[in-house]
Image (cartoon, rainbow, N blue to C red):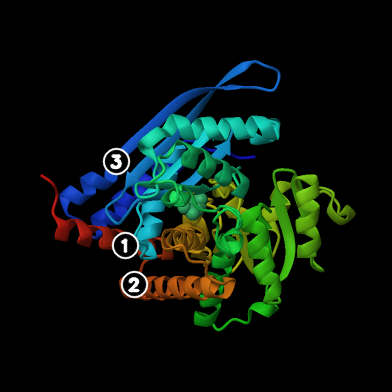
Amino acid sequence: MTTHKDKLYTSVKNKIREVSQTLNLSQSVKTILRQPKNEIIVNFPVKMDNGDLKLFKGYRIQHNNVLGPFKGGLRFHPCVNLDEVKALAALMTIKCSLVDLPLGGGKGGIKFDPTKLSQAELERVTRRFVSALGSNISPVHDIPAPDVGTNAQIMVWMMDTYMNLAGPNEKHLARGIVTGKTIECGGTLGREQATGRGVVMCIEEWAKVNNVDISSLTYSVQGFGNVGSWAADALNILGAKLTAVNDHTGTIIDSSGIDVNRLRAYVKENGGVKGFDKLEERSRESFFSHQCDIMVPAALENQITEEEAEVMNMKLIAEGANGPTTPEAEKILLQKGVEFIPDVLANAGGVTVSYFEWVQNRTRDSWTEEEVNTKLRRKLQKAYKEVAELQKEQNVDMRTACYMKSIKNLENVYLQRGIFP
Ligand code: GLU
């Protein structure tokens, strides 16, 4: 798998710089956005099942909190590194501001492969990380959530650890320390599906603007985890046809259509798409060169580089993952006339419903899934419309328009508040 580890940080930094210049952003705001506010790195020991003690490196980057508490996922993956988490935290700041959430941007992670640990080890790593982070996270200061390699169970362990460490007066407010929890433990209906569903709600807006009937379209998905599989589910409901999937285990292609529900069950059981329906194993390249209307990259960053872009040719790329396309690849694809719904908009459904979860935790309320989805659609529709208008007005690409709207919003807040002291 292609990984250009430090590339994401450079591209996010360059994009913020480029847009800041276009906007003629005030020097002070430019300076503030250049670096995260806080970079927390903890090394903590955990006892393995065999009795050995192993040291883990955990990160929490708090990029910006001018709009509200730091917010963003925690990633458990062997490639986690400081620059990657810094980039992902900055993307969260852009994302939350773009969809008008009263939240800032943060991200964290631990560098290890969670699939190599037992459940008991994974639980100890998670709990120990929470205790190592101490007061750096809190329901009103910095609120983690799931990301690559983490899930609702891990969030519940985090919440439980935090609650056990909290005093009696804070205990029940402490439920909002993380989002993406199981429903039973204070999660919200619709959070699990939210990121994938949000991707498709954005695709629906694109289809409206372009007068396209989604049920006549074919699509491919990279990564069939939480985001990819729920995006496929939502597209399936709209009648579009899934014809290719790639993940870390392999590539499957079937132009007559892949059964989304059976594939989800298969991936859950087998850990990947390889071998599904006895489909012939195909190369990674054949996934990218496969002809379809929409691609949803929903795996890791930097998957679409110049090499992939040269062979790709679809109408639309809706980025479920954070940073899946390198700037060089984006340039090639835009020249080919491929349209983008960039990550900060396409996958903002996840953090939006995280916000809804947090609000429900604070108000001790619980909303129906329909309420959640209606509110989510409203948020994404509004953001999409404003970005599309800005894109037209400024004659820029969609990603640039997203950054312009988001950064302008941050600047307005800074200029009104003033900079202390
Ligand atoms: N990890 C997700 C993202 O990248 C969700 C973050 C959240 O819900 O706070 O947007």
The percent position of residue 338, horizontal first and vertical second, equals 54, 65
Residue type (three-letter) at the residue carrying disc 1:
Met
Q: Is residue 346 left or right of residue 278?
A: left
The residue where tag 2 is placed is: 390
> Residue 39 or 94: which is nearer the viewer?
39
Residue beneath disc 1: 404
Q: Quadrant of the N terminus?
A: top right
Q: Nearer the viewer, residue 260 or 255?
A: 260
Picture disc at residue 214: none
Disc number lying in front (3 or 1): 3
Tell which circle, 2 or 1, labels the residue nearer the N-terminal end: 2
Closer to the chain start, of discs 2 and 3, is 3
Please tell me whether mark 1 sits on a helix, a strand or a loop.
helix
> Residue at left 32%, top 41%?
36
Residue count near mark 1 (Cα–Cα under 10 Å), binned few <14, some 14–19, many ≥20: many
* C-alpha span from label 3 to label 1: 21 Å
x, y (%) of residue 401? 36, 65
Asked whether the residues under the numbered discs 2 and 3 touch, taking CB atoms below 8 Å apart as contact, a structural biologist would say no
Residues at marks 3 and 1 touching, judged by CB atoms closer than 8 Å: no
Element under label 3? Answer: loop
Residue highlighted by disc 3: 37
> Mark 2 or mark 3: which is in front?
3
Horizontal relation, residue 328 to residue 290: left or right = left
State the separation of the CA atoms marked 2 and 3: 29 Å
